[in-house]
Amino acid sequence: MAAGARLENANPLIYGRSSERPLTAREQEEEAVDPIDTREIFDLIRSINDPEHPLSLEELNVVEQLRVNVTDHENSVSVAFTPTIPHCSMATLIGLSIKVKLLRSLPARFKVDVHITPGTHASEQAVNKQLADKERVAAALENSHLLEVVNQCLSERL
């Protein structure tokens, strides 16, 4: 964030992080067919960095496992996220970061739907329309500045 810029939500509520899920013996078998489940998707997105704060989306309660739906046999993943404030200008960027993380991490067979939790954002319909439009998402990722910001959200924190 630029020096001197004001944060929209200067004092967000911070939630605890859930523990890492231990791998089972079956999950560690190379040849075992392991369907993708909600916890696996949550584990992929929980550590995405918030664009305004040095916190993860999980720590800000923007993403929760209960808002992740997976139907492996139908190749479908749906994630609802909850911005920290109803007028969050970063909502589209957060949704784009979640979508990019999942598109980069999951097999190409999956259809990925990322949307705002109903009733939690003033521009919910407009943001959801942008995130659902493949051409808009592709155009956004062709913007080098925006792609750099998304990659910062997806980078590991030191």
Image (cartoon, rainbow, N blue to C red):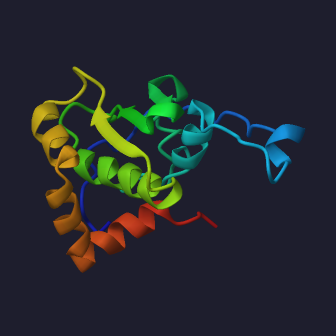
How many numbered marks, from 0 up?
Answer: 0
Which quadrant is the N terminus positioned in?
A: bottom left
Between residues 128 and 61, which one lies in front from this camera angle?
128
Res 129 → quadrant: top left
Classify residue 103 as left or right of residue 59. Answer: left
Rendered position, 137 above or below 8: below
User: Residue at left 36%, top 44%?
Assistant: 111
- State the residue lying farthest toward the bottom: 144
Determine if residue 52 is in view.
Answer: no
User: Residue at left 43%, top 37%?
Assistant: 77
Res 74 → quadrant: top left
Residue 106, how many percent across, how many down? 51, 53
Residue 75, how many percent across, how many down? 45, 39
Which quadrant is the C terminus positioned in?
A: bottom right
User: Residue at left 43%, top 61%?
Assistant: 153
Determine if residue 10 is in view.
Answer: yes
Between residues 9 and 72, which one lies in front from this camera angle?
72
Residue 81, how many percent across, how many down? 36, 34
- State the residue lying farthest toward the right: 25
Between residues 61 and 39, which one lies in front from this camera angle?
39
Residue 60, how many percent across, how many down? 47, 37
Classify residue 122 as left or right of residue 42. Answer: left
